[in-house]
Structure formats: C-alpha cells, structure tokens
Image (tube, grey):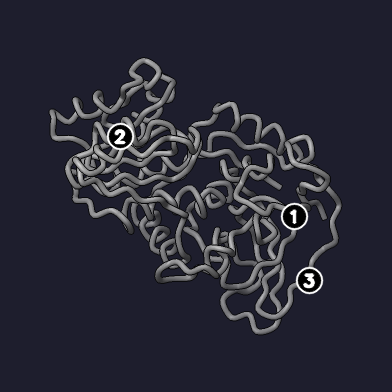
Amino acid sequence: MRALQLTDGFGLEHLKLIDAPTPTPGPYEVLVRMRAVSLNFRDLLMMNGLYGGGLSLPITPFSDGCGIVEAVGEKVTRFKGGERVATMFFQKWLSGPPTIAGLTSALGWPVPGAGAELATFHEDGLSKAPDFLDDHQVATLPCAALTAWRALFEDARLQPGDTVLLLGTGGVSIFGLQFAKAAGYRTIITSSSDDKLARAATLGADHGINYRQAPEWGGAARALTGGRAIDFIMGVGGAVLSEGLKAIALGGHIAIIGVLGGAAEPLPFPSMIGTGAKLQGVMVGSRTMFEAMCRAIEARRIAPVVDKVYPVAEAVAAFEAMRAGEHFGKIVLEF
C-alpha cells in the first residue's frame, strides 16, 4: 500500500510516496482505509525539521484525516467495519485538562501519522464526524477546526454581540469566522489580499482589513468598533501582540494559535498589564471537545472551506501552495 514518508532527510524534496507493508490491527486497534488528509502549517514545519525538538526519521506525516474502518482488532468496542471516522490530533487526550501523556500523543509526530492508504489507530484516537460533510471536509476538522473551537468556546468567555478579530484567512481563521458567526459574534478578519477579504465577506465577515495597506491594523480594528475595542483576537504569530494589544478591550482575550509569522515577537509587558488582557496559547483540544464541536457543526450545518484538493502523489505541490500562501481555508490530499 502507498504511504507518504520522510525517510532520508528533511525538506520537501525528501517527501516520497513509498510502497509500505499493510498493517494489521492489534488489540484495541482499528485499521482505517484513509480517504483524505488535510495539511497544517505544523506539517510543513516538520517537513523542514523545524517542529519542536527530537525529530527523527522516518516520519509518516499528517494528523488530520478521514477514512473508512477496514477491520478492527480484538477488544475494539467503539467502531465496526464500514464506519467513517476522523483521526484525533492527540491520540490520548480524551477529555478533561491536558496531561503530559495526552500532549505527547500527537499524530504525525511522535505518533506515526495518517498519511498512508491503510493505517492503524487505537480506537480511542478516532471519532465519528457529521454525515452531511464529505470526506475532504471531515479531514479538515481534527486540528484547524478544533483549535478555533477551543479558543472561542472552551478558553474564552464571550457573549453574543461581542467582537472577535481573526488574523489571516488560513484554515484556523476561516473556521473561527464560521464558528463566530454561528454564535452571534461581530467579526473582523485580516488578509494581505482584497480578494480573500471579499471571500471572507461571503462567509459573514462584518469587516475586513488589508494588513499590507494598514500595517498598524490594531488601530484600524479598534476604529471599526466605534472605540469599544475587540473582545477576542485569534492570531497566528507576526504582530499579534504589538498590534493586538492596541485593539484589545480591557480584560479581553488573545489566543495564540501558531507561529506562522515567526516566534521572536517580544512581550510588551506594559501593554499587557495596562489592558489586563488574557494571553493564552492554544494546542488543539481533546476528543470530548471534538465531539462537542461536531454536534454544533451538525446543528448549524457549517461546511468547512476546502480551497484546494490534490492527489496524494502531488503532496509536494500541495505543500508548496501552502508555503506560498495561495490557499483560503484548507488544502486537502486525497487517496
């Protein structure tokens, strides 16, 4: 069976589609025939050897996938053959607060990922997803959707009518926009592209800011609230602190969800103290959070935005599109 693997070095040129042995599920394990996986910026960092410490080869990438149960091992009770499942980002964070065991069970690294035609997972590391979504859409849920969900509804304490600011138009931010609109929040989104801002408006964004035209977007965002300021900001790095603290309301919430713009931004302590803002890093979420999110997606018929779909043999081209920032929402590979 085919599998994507980084075998002899780091860098996209080393990502190969190989012929790998077909796995057999052991006790409590489920064999899944993967239909689709979605790309996250984390995957790109791993391809280049830049994610965390201790990376070692070979690596089977991808945390986010959708597939059909092919077979189950002994003692499996949660699934049966033929059911469609989504992979969980953290294979061992099932519920409650995070633990070391849970946070060290991330799929793709250190646990071998979903980038194979057939892959085995512990039954606890899988979940069902809304039936009305297609395979590509389900594959976008485990990391990007759950990160946005947790930041908005598990960590923050917002009320309908509050204003949220979403930085960028990648997967997490677009999910954040969709969830925020469903919850009755006012929404502002940023992008370097007017075309992408126009697309965001069709999803319900109340305002858009082109940060190339307005690099001091913090003041521009505050102005859009009539001076009331922003209750919640979700950012992926860059100037999320220096500009975000110009926009945040007293006691507001800033969720840091990644390092897309770099990890070297200094902490502006005077502004943090002066605003009393809560600054919180977000590392995806638990299976219980995922299941709550899926119930809301089902109830509100929220359709994930899949912008580009590539065959698995063109994985390198998909990553190059991500690196170039060509996408709006999510990029998916299909088997």
Q: Quadrant of residue 72?
A: bottom right
SS type, badge 2: helix
Residue type marked 1 = Glu
Question: Which residue ends up furthest to the top in the rendered image?
Answer: 213
Residue at 22% across, 37% down: 230
Return the x and y of residue 267 as percentages of the image width and height: 36, 39
Label 1 element class: loop
Residue indicated by mark 1 = 117
Quadrant where the image shows the N terminus? bottom right
Query: Looking at the picture, which amino acid does disc 2 mark?
Result: Gly
Q: Residues within 10 Å of mark 2 (few under 14, many from 20)?
A: many
- Determine whether 326 is above or below 214 in the image: below
Disc 3 marks a residue whose amino acid type is Thr
Distance of label 1 from label 2 (alpha carbons): 42 Å
* Mark 2 or 3, nearer chain start: 3
The label shown at residue 24 is 3
**Residue 202, above or below 58:** above
Give the left or right position of residue 60, taking residue 228 as reference. right
77 or 187, nearer to the observer: 187
Residue at (42, 35) in percent of width and height: 265
**Disc 2 target residue:** 244
Residue drawn at x 47%, y 43% as measured from the top left: 258
Q: Nearer the viewer, mark 2 or mark 3?
A: 2
* Label whose residue precedes the other's in the sequence (3 or 1): 3
